[in-house]
Image (cartoon, rainbow, N blue to C red):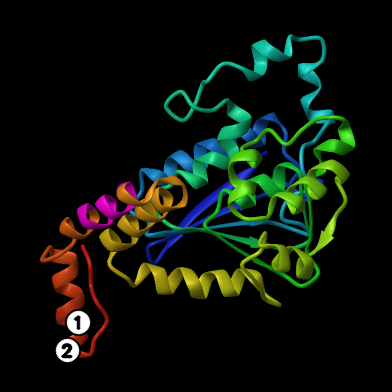
Amino acid sequence: MSRVSVTYKDHIAHVRLTRADKMNAVDQDMISAIIAAGEEVAASKARAVIVSGEGKAFCAGIDISGLSGMIGKNPAELLMPRTHGDGTTNQWQEVAMIWSRMDIPVIAAVHGVCFGAGLQIALGADIRIASPDAQFAVMEMKWGILPDMGGMVLLPKLVRTDVLRKLTYTAAPISAEQAERWGLVTELADDPFAAAQTLAETIAGKSPSAICAAKRLIAVAETADAKTVLDAESREQVDLLGKPHQMEVIAASFAKRPAVFD
């Protein structure tokens, strides 16, 4: 059975987890399907991505029963090889990090539970829009393990260290309202998918080259020193000024019409 669907409309890629009968819990087939979906979208001409879940939940986390094949194997042999992401991630980490590395903006539309692996997938998005009844949890401590699907790269960019520690130490679910206050969620919407669609349409209507440049620049700005960021600002701007996409933005603005990009 398919674990993930990928469709395209109006320059927007729609990636949906389709294991609704298991609340989109992540098993080996879904790991492979999510990575394949990310690779497909990265190679497409999409200008924005919406990641969502089918059924009652975004993703309930790892399907423990579905990963029984790990029993009796050497954890180091499974986890330490860097098999994805140009030698930076293992397959479990790639499930989240493939979205973080995406050249184009990624929006997660979250409803129901978003636990463990599901939370880390959502963290890979640029923006998370959640329904008011959604719940979030760094669930791994429940099983005596740690978040190891990119969570420790992505969480510290969003929440204070005390919040990160409380979430990690307790595995306690929190409400969407609390998640928004703590920075895990960008905004709440009664229909998160519709809100994500509206936002994606706005992004898709902007200069594709400027949007990609902005995502690259923000990634640099999050971690680099001032000199590096200032150099990156200038370098990215040089590559935009006077180029076809920017000229089309200006022409469309003066003509009071939507911009049309190749």
The C terminus: image quadrant: bottom left
Do tag 2 and tag 1 residues touch (Cβ < 8 Å)? yes
| Residue 97 visible from this viewpoint | yes
The magenta stretch is 228-235
The kind of secondary structure element at disc 2 is: helix
Please report the residue visible at 37 percent of the width from the left and 62 percent of the height from the top: 11
Q: Name the amino acid, label 2.
A: Ala
Q: Disc number at residue 252?
A: 1
Up the image or down, 215 lies above or below 84; here it is below
Q: Position of residue 257 (x, y in %)?
A: 24, 86
Q: Quadrant of residue 252?
A: bottom left
Up the image or down, 236 lies above or below 34; here it is below
The kind of secondary structure element at disc 1 is: helix
Between residues 170 and 55, which one lies in front from this camera angle?
A: 170
Picture mark count: 2
Please report the residue visible at 76 percent of the width from the left and 17 percent of the height from the top: 70
Please report the residue visible at 37 percent of the width from the left and 68 percent of the height from the top: 204
| Residue 2 visible from this viewpoint | no
The N terminus: image quadrant: top right
